[in-house]
């Protein structure tokens, strides 16, 4: 459920801030999620 909210938030940021910022934000989010699962 939380994952769906995060995906919705990143989709909003993609539209609002543009592609480049979205790419870096998504990469940072993926790294954060990977670290939190370890």
Image (cartoon, helix red, strand yellow):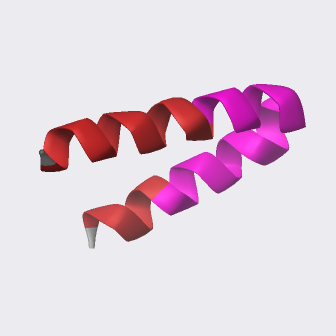
Q: Is residue 9 above or below residue 1?
A: above
Please indicate whether residue 5 sits to the left or right of residue 16 in the image.
left
Q: Position of residue 3 (x, y in %)?
A: 35, 64
Q: Position of residue 28 (x, y in %)?
A: 50, 30
Q: Which quadrant is home to the N terminus?
A: bottom left
Q: Residue at x 45, y 44 (%)?
A: 30
Q: Position of residue 8 (x, y in %)?
A: 55, 60
Q: Is residue 4 above or below residue 6?
A: below
Q: Main secondary structure of the magenta part?
A: helix
Q: Is residue 14 above or below residue 32?
A: below
From this viewpoint, which residue is outermost toward the front?
38
Q: Is residue 7 above or below residue 25?
A: below
Q: Quadrant of residue 13?
A: top right
Q: Quadrant of residue 36?
A: top left
Please indicate whether residue 17 sits to the left or right of residue 27 in the image.
right
| Count of numbered circles on the image | 0
Q: Is residue 20 magenta?
A: yes
Q: Residue at x 12, y 45 (%)?
A: 38
Please indicate whether residue 16 sits to the left or right of residue 31 in the image.
right
Q: Nearer the viewer, residue 7 or 28?
A: 28
Magenta stretch: give its range: 7-25
Q: Quadrant of residue 24?
A: top right
Q: Position of residue 14 (x, y in %)?
A: 76, 44
Q: Is residue 18 magenta?
A: yes
Q: Residue at x 59, y 40 (%)?
A: 26
Q: Residue at x 16, y 50 (%)?
A: 37
């Amino acid at each position: 459920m939380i994952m769906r909210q995060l995906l919705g938030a990143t989709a909003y940021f993609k539209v609002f801030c543009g592609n480049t910022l979205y790419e870096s934000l998504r990469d940072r989010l993926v790294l954060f999620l990977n670290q939190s699962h370890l």
